Image (cartoon, rainbow, N blue to C red):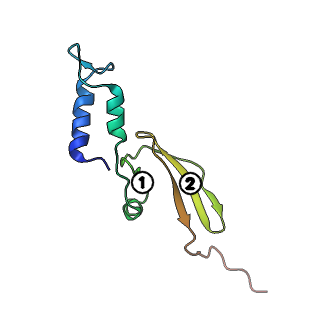
Amino acid sequence: MIDPQLQALIRDVSDSADDTGRRDGHTVVDKEVIAALKAYTVQASQSDFVKSSGSECPFCQSVSVYRGHLGLALGVGKRACICNDCEGTWNEVYGLSGYTVLASPSPR
């Protein structure tokens, strides 16, 4: 999670500079510095990630997340994810928690 004050500063500097990192002909900040600041994040805790139902990136809380194929093996599922905003990557992990009956077998 990015500190809200840092996030506001990044947004202000990013919004005020053009694509070359200049404002009114003067360099205000190097684009690589902005990228580095945006990458400065604190990872969400496991419990916070679960509370959000995995709907957000655990690094920047973006909801713009690509989720790959869910693979299952021996009651454990894993799915690779990548954030489209900060480019953080992680695996979502799923566990078998029980079953529900869809149809009982016919008596023999």
Q: Depth check: 99 or 25 in front?
A: 25
Above or below 60: residue 73: below
Image location (x, y in percent) of residue 12: 22, 32
Image location (x, y in percent) of residue 103: 65, 75
- Categorize mark 2 by other alpha carbons within 10 Å: few (<14), some (14-19), many (20+): some
Residue 79 is tagged as 2
Q: Distance between the Cα atoms at labels 1 and 2?
A: 13 Å
Quarter in which the C terminus is drawn: bottom right
Which residue extends farthest top? 25
Residue 2 is tagged as none
Query: For numbered disc 1, what is the local secondary structure?
Result: loop
Tell me the residue at 66%/68% (across/down).
74
| In the image: residue 47, left or right of residue 71 | left
Residue 55 is tagged as 1
Q: Amino acid at mark 1?
A: Ser
Image location (x, y in percent) of residue 70: 60, 55
| In the image: residue 34, left or right of residue 23 | right
Q: Depth check: 75 or 27 in front?
A: 27
